[in-house]
Amino acid sequence: MAHSKTFASQRADFTLTAVVLSKTQWLIPIFLACLVANLSQVLGQAAASTGRFRIAEKSADSLRISILTGSEAVFQADGMLLTDPRLVTVTADGKTNLVFTASECLYDQDKKTIRSSGELSLSTGDGQMQLKGVGFSGNLAGPTLSVLSNVVAKLDKKLTQARQKSAKPELLQITSRQFEIEPGRALFRDSVLVKDADGTLSSDSIAVGMREDDWEVQTILASGNVALQAEQIKTTSEQADYDLPAGLIVLKGNPNWAMGERSGRANLLMIHRESQSVNAEGDVYMRLPAGAGGTGGVLDFNAPTAGPAKDSKGESVEIRSNVFLFQAATGENVGFARYIGAVQLTRGEGRLQCSFLNVRLAKGSGGAVESVNAEVGVNLAQGGDQLTAQTATYDLAQKTIQFRGGARWNLGTQSGQARLVELSPNDGVFRASGRVKMQLPRPKGDGRFLLPPASGKVAKSEPSGEPLLVVCDSFEYRQAVGSVGLDSATFTGNVVLSGDEGLRVLAQNVVIGIDSEGAGLVSLDASGDLVVSTTGENAMRYVGDRLVYSTADETMRLTGKPSVEIRTRLEGAEVVALGQAAIYNLGTGLLRLTGDPVLKTDEGELRGREVVFNPHTKRLKATGRWKMTLNPRTIAKMRERTKKQGKTKP
């Protein structure tokens, strides 16, 4: 390897013409100079000085040349003492990698090393990184350099060669106790602290990756006890990798983050600072405060259960998933928070499971939640209540939660399915529409209000235990406001209600009043093309416009225009009752017909202002200008019976 040195005279009266010598030529003069210097020290004379100094060394990989200069070089026993040393590394095509300056250093020409306990300054060729420290050592063949203490560096994150002059600097300040640099890599060690306008980062060490050709900084890798503080967000991990050109920070090794009452963790966390986006992967867990922008509102579905649900709105929200994606909202674009894979959202007794959960953030609102959408295998539960569907959408503006795609529910003692289910948590409304199919319990105290008891039996006061089946176009359950008054259930459109004993109610609209505390039916109002039928012994059929049932007076009232029609069979014979109204008393079992009533049997007709039928005694009674018409066969039977009775008299 060829070397070159240039020496100038140390005194005005001595001149040594500058020459360029090969290594074999300058070894002897240097050896003699060192010998003279050593003799001078022994004799108490001043060490020999060569004046200005310059040497060029090719790196071990032959990719660059290190040029070391000094304003003066003084031979000493342990090397050559350089004043104002300057070290410049240059690539083969003349591009400057590194510029190093100090007040003095000791150069070992055999080992090609420099060292000093004094201060130094260092910068990359493009000025992107500038550094100062105290105490250093280095090797020109590397070239390598180590700074021993008080390291302070400044790094321009945005500087590239294309924008070197026009870009406004965006500086990082890095401090540490030690620093090392070699081609393509710089290392800060021991109590490392990074500061910039966005926050601070601390770690045990930081490795800076640089391009081989021009040493432009590309990456920053922090390792060991990494803590990143950006505004109100603090993140900790074992490793943080910052890709400057991409503006991406990747945190590994159990990254955790916290912002006030919000916190989370994952196996991997990626932050893109310029776009304000965040990706978290692997065992993602997040904890949000109770009022976390509406995300937990999807759990407030207030199912229509038999008893009051436990209030969990004051509890924090926990979210788990495989992946989490976040994009901050701006003045022009909406933002989002997406949870992907095995998503679980819990708060108190409320829990949501799905494959995808997307939180939409309104633009220009500082990140306010606009809607929450869950997809694929949605399962929403609150205590023992449960709702399932393919999708669930929580609209914060409308304060509603909508379930679509095979929606099914099991709420308290009722269950069902529909194309669409909508909940209004604030006003306690449950709606279902589109091919609604439901199972309802027989309410306590219903007295089988549509089923007159069989002969010789009293009215039944307890349900059979089998559910009532309902099919309709839409259903709405509305909870009483403030637990005052009755809950209501409304069935609309082609309503079919059937029971286990052959009960079947056809209507266009059915409204039921329910006492939620006792789970008892208090009232029923059915209207529109009303047809009610039963099967079995004493089967009956009701036809009218409206049926109203109330526990207040224990009556069921059937009305119609021009009349209602009731058909049944007693002892094998058909009975038809007509009138403007039919009133059935649950307590007495009496059936009263009013409004020009007509009772038709095989034996004849009975008319009056009111006709009363007693199922226990099978007796009829008519009041108010009543009229009975018997058919000839009945009259013949009556005459025959009278003759028989007359013959038997004594």
Image: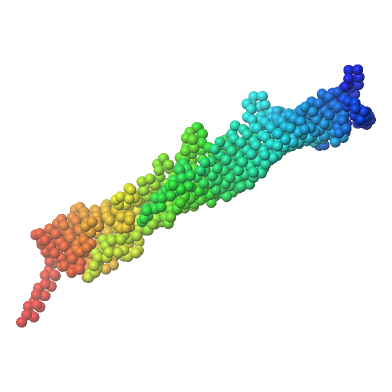
Measuring 92% from the left and 28% from the top, which residue is drawn there? Answer: 43
Viewer-closest of 62 and 265: 265
Measuring 53% from the left and 37% from the top, which residue is drawn there? Answer: 328
Left or right: residue 155 compared with residue 138: left
Residue 470 position (above or below residue 69) = below
Q: Hey, which quadrant is residue 131 in on the image? A: top right
Viewer-closest of 218 and 69: 69
Left or right: residue 149 compared with residue 308: right
Q: In which quarter of the image is the N terminus?
A: top right
Q: Quadrant of the C terminus?
A: bottom left
Q: In the rendered image, is residue 475 in sight?
A: yes
Residue 144 position (above or below residue 530) = above
Query: Whole-percent x and y of residue 386?
Result: 43, 54
Measuring 72% from the left and 35% from the top, which residue is drawn there? Answer: 149
Viewer-closest of 382 and 171: 171
Q: In the rendered image, is residue 22 in sight?
A: no
